[in-house]
Image (spheres, rainbow, N blue to C red):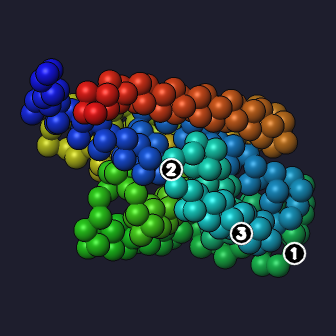
């Protein structure tokens, strides 16, 4: 009579580890933070700037109507993301894009008004409804920073993790996306201030933000600085980078831009972002297949 197969402690541990990895893979709702993640973030935020300006300014819908429309789009995309049972690059990055577009016009509505400084070609108004609150970039930024701090305080008090790869609950995702929407709006204000009011211009503002991001990368090597803090600072800063890059692509040459137009720039950026989504989706499928192949021998041994 043959001896029955004996499972060693190592076999049991490996099996449990594989099961835990599979469960985490199924439950994961948000992406891993890699270089590809940041490339897609910058592409999405740049597209959010050009698309927001396309609807509000080029199509002359105005900041008020465009903000309402884009916020409703954000809500729809967020519901799809929240109802999903696992990470889907198309769902996730569509929400990021919608927060970037809504953040663009929300920031413009808060900070701008119907003065000649913000309306070109002698226009007296822009779309139906209020032209803007005219708070100005410093006041608008202070309000948004305060809201963001409140969100992070509630998040901290709730005891839920700030590590996005470990966020799998509805409450955690709700806090995460609230912070994303406010941070993208704040980033737009910062980008517009650097481009329009600081004297640096579009290219100068982009170079300044790029330098700040390089410092954050260097700080990742410093053990006393939490990577979670660096992530959120970088997340906010990539928004003004996208804002200045978007303005650089679309604004007239006389103002320091390339004058490519909001429609053309948005079309190109949408194609780039869609291609990156396809790439991310392909990588997720490959990772799922690899995980399944790793589990099969352990399953046979456990059986």
Would residue 70 appear left or right of 160 to someone viewing this image? right
Q: Earlier in the sequence, mark 1 or mark 2?
A: 2
Query: Which element is circle 1 on?
Result: loop
Horizontal placement of 246 versus 250: left or right?
A: left
Q: Which residue is mark 2?
A: 86
Residue 66, quarter of the rendered image: bottom right
Q: What SS does tag 3 mark?
A: helix
Which of the numbered marks, if any, corresponds to residue 72? 3
Between 36 and 57, the one lying in front of the other is: 36
Give the residue at mark 1: 128
State the separation of the CA atoms marked 2 and 3: 23 Å
Q: Residue at x 80, y 71 (%)?
A: 65
Q: Residues within 10 Å of mark 1 (few under 14, many from 20)?
A: few
- Measuring 41% from the left and 43% from the top, which residue is drawn there? 25
Of mark 1 and mark 3, the one earlier in the sequence is: 3
Kindly report which numbered mark, 1 or 2, lies closer to the viewer in this rendering. 2
83 relative to 209, above or below = below
Q: Secondary structure at mark 2?
A: loop
Q: Mark 1 to mark 3: distance in Å? A: 18 Å
């Amino acid at each position: 009579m043959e001896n029955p197969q004996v499972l060693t402690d190592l076999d049991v541990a490996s099996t449990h580890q594989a099961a835990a990895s599979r469960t985490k893979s199924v439950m994961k709702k948000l992406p891993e933070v890699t270089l590809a993640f940041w490339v897609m973030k910058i592409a999405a935020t740049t597209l959010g700037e050009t698309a927001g300006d396309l609807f509000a300014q080029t199509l002359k819908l105005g900041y008020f109507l465009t903000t309402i429309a884009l916020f409703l789009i954000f809500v729809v995309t967020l519901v799809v993301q929240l109802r999903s049972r696992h990470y889907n690059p198309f769902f996730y990055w569509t929400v990021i894009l919608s927060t970037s577009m809504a953040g663009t016009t929300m920031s413009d509505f808060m900070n701008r008004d119907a003065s000649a400084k913000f309306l070109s070609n002698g226009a007296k108004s822009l779309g139906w409804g209020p032209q803007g609150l005219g708070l100005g970039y410093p006041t608008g930024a202070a309000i948004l920073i305060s809201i963001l701090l409140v969100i992070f305080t509630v998040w901290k008090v709730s005891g839920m993790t700030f590590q996005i790869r470990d966020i799998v609950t509805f409450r955690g995702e709700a806090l995460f996306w609230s912070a994303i929407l406010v941070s993208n709006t704040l980033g737009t204000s910062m980008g517009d201030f650097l481009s329009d009011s600081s004297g640096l211009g579009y290219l100068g503002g982009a170079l300044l933000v790029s330098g700040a991001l390089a410092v954050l990368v260097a700080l990742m090597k410093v053990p006393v600085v939490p990577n979670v803090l660096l992530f959120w600072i970088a997340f906010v800063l990539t928004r003004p980078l996208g804002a200045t890059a978007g303005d650089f692509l679309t604004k007239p040459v006389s103002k320091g831009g390339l004058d490519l137009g909001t429609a053309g720039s948005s079309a190109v950026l949408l194609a780039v972002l869609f291609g990156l989504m396809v790439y991310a989706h392909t990588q997720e499928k490959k990772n799922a297949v690899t995980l399944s192949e790793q589990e099969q021998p352990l399953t046979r041994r456990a059986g």
